[in-house]
Amino acid sequence: MIRLTNVHKWFKDLHVLNGVNLNVHQGEVVVVCGPSGSGKSTLIRTINQLETISEGEIWVDGKNVTDPKTDLNALRAEVGFVFQHFNLYPHLSVLDNITLSPIRVKKMGKAAAEQLAVELLDRVGLAHKKDAFPAQLSGGQQQRVAIARGLAMQPKVMLFDEPTSALDPEMIGEVLQVMRDLAKSGMTMMCVTHEMGFAREVADYVVFVDQGQVVEQAKPEEFFSNPQHERAKQFLRQLRSH
Amino acid sequence: MNYNWDWNIFFKSTGIGDEIYLDWFISGLGWTIALALAAWAIALVIGGLLGVMRTLPNKWLSGLATAYVELFRNVPLLVQLFIWYFVVPDYLPEQTQVWFKQELNPMVSAYISVTLCLGLFTAARVCEQVRTGIQALPKGQANAAMAVGFTLPQVYRHVLLPQAFRVVIPPLTSEFLNVFKNSSVASLIGLMELLAQAKQTAEFSANIFEAFTLATLIYFTLNMSIMKFMGWVEKRVRIPGLMVEGGK
Ligand SMILES: Nc1ncnc2c1ncn2[C@@H]1O[C@H](COP(=O)(O)OP(=O)(O)OP(=O)(O)O)[C@@H](O)[C@H]1O
Ligand SMILES: [Mg+2]
C-alpha cells in the first residue's frame, strides 16, 4: 500500500531523511517513533507530498507519488491525514468541517455528505456536537472530529502525526480509543506516536527512526521488551522515565 | 473679535439661481460619497486580488503584486492625482482624448481621474492588509486543506479567505475611513465635493466658521456610520467560541 525506497530529504544542508526504506501493506498498522527532531513528521508528510523529497521513490496504492505526472490532488483525496494540532477549520461548524471535502473534492451531494458526516460523528462519539464550532470543543473532541473529517473522504490509508501529543492527559484515551476501533476495522494506518500501550495493542510493527534513518523495525512486543540498537534502548529508557 | 455667528446661513440664498447654501453641501456630499464608494470598490477588488497574489507560491505573480505596492505606496497621493489628471489623458488614443478633455463635463472627467487615482492608491494599502491577514493564519490550515486534495484555488476559496476576511475587517474599516478623508484631494482639481463646497460657501458668505463646522460634522457623521456598519458586519460574521480580539 505504501512503499518508500531510499528516500532522502535535505532542508538546505540538513539531511533530514537519510535513505529511508519502508513498506506498509494493506490493513497493516505501523507505529513510527523516535526522538524529537529525528524526522518523523517529515517522513509521514512526504507520503502525501505535503513535503517533497530530494531523492528516492514513494509509491502509494500503486501510484508513484513523486512522479510529476501523478495527480497529487486525486492521491491526497485517498490518503487521510490527522495533524498534531487538529487543524479544524475554525470558521465552519463541525458538520461543515466534515462535509467540505466530500462535497468539493468528491462532488458528493450535500445530503449524502451530511448523512455520512453524522454516521462518522456517531462513530467517534460526537453526534451531539454536529452544530458546534471547533473553538467550542475540547482538544480531544476536536481531534476526534479531525479523524472523522479524514474518514469522510473514505481514504485507503490514514496517516497520523502525533495525534495525542497536544492533548491533556485525560483526553488522550478517547482519541486512542477511536484509533483502536479504526485499526480493528481493517484500516491501513501509519501513526507517529509515543503511546506504547496503543502500539502494543494494535501495531503490526514499530518503526524506530533516529537521525533520519530507520534504525529498527520490529513487532511491538519485541521492540519494547528487547530492542536491538543502543539508540532504541536509550530512547525507550527516556520514554519510560517520563 | 467681532464675528457674526449665523447658523441660518445654510438656508439663505447663494445668489445663484434659487439655490441655498445647504444645496451646495448636499451636492458636495453626493460627490464625496459617489467618489469614496467607487474608489473603495476599485480598491477592494484590486487590493484583494493583489493581496492574494502576494501570498502565492508563484514568484512572478507575487513579485508583480509587490512591485505594485511599492510603486503606489511610495509616490505621494497628490502627485499621483496630478499624474492621473494632467498626464495620463495625454496618452489616451486621439478620440478618447478629445472626448475626455472637451466633450465630457469637466466635473465628470475630474471625478473619473480622482476615482481611479484614489482607488488604485488605496488598493496598495488593502493589498497589504489582505496579505497580512492571510499570512497570519496558522500554517496548518493550508496544510489541512491540501491534505484532503483541494486545489490551490479551493484552499483559498474555502479555507484561507473566509478566515482572513474576518481578520481584516478592522484594518479595512480604517482604510475605508481614509478613503473618505483622502477624497478631499479632489477639490484640488476642481471637483466640487464636500470640502470644495464648504470652501466656496465660506468665500461667498463670509461665514467661515459655520461652513467648516457643518463640513466637519458631516465628515464625522459619515465616519461614525461607517464604523457602526462595519462593527455590525464584524459581529455578524464572528466565529462562535473564538475570542473577539484578532479573530483567533
Ligand atoms: N520546513 C523546514 N525547514 C527547515 N528545517 C526543517 C523544516 N521542517 C523540519 N525541519 C528540521 O528537520 C528536522 C526533522 O524535523 P521533524 O519535524 O520531521 O522531526 P520530528 O521527528 O517530527 O520531531 P518532533 O518529535 O519534535 O515532532 C528537525 O531538525 C527540524 O528542525
Ligand atoms: Mg513531529
Image: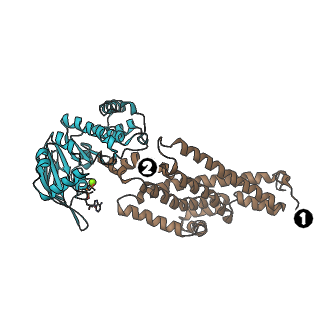
Chain colours: A cyan, B brown
Q: Secondary structure at mark 1?
A: loop
Q: Residue at x 55, y 44 (%)?
A: B233
Residue B2: mark: 1
Q: Is residue A194 left or right of residue A22?
A: right
- What amino acid type is highlighted by mark number 1? Asn
Residue B104 placement (x, y as % from top left): 64, 58
Q: Earlier in the sequence, mark 2 or mark 1?
A: 1
Residue annotated with mark 2: B161
Along the viewing direction, whichever of B119 and A214 lies nearer the viewer: A214
The numbered mark 2 sits on a residue in which chain? B
Residue B164 placement (x, y as % from top left): 45, 51
Along the viewing direction, whichever of A52 and B32 lies nearer the viewer: A52
Is the residue at mark 2 from the same chain as the one at mark 1?
yes
Along the viewing direction, whichever of A136 and B40 lies nearer the viewer: A136
- What amino acid type is highlighted by mark number 2? Leu
Q: Residues within 10 Å of mark 1 (few under 14, many from 20)?
A: few
What is the quadrant of the N terminus of chain B in the image? bottom right
Q: Secondary structure at mark 2?
A: helix
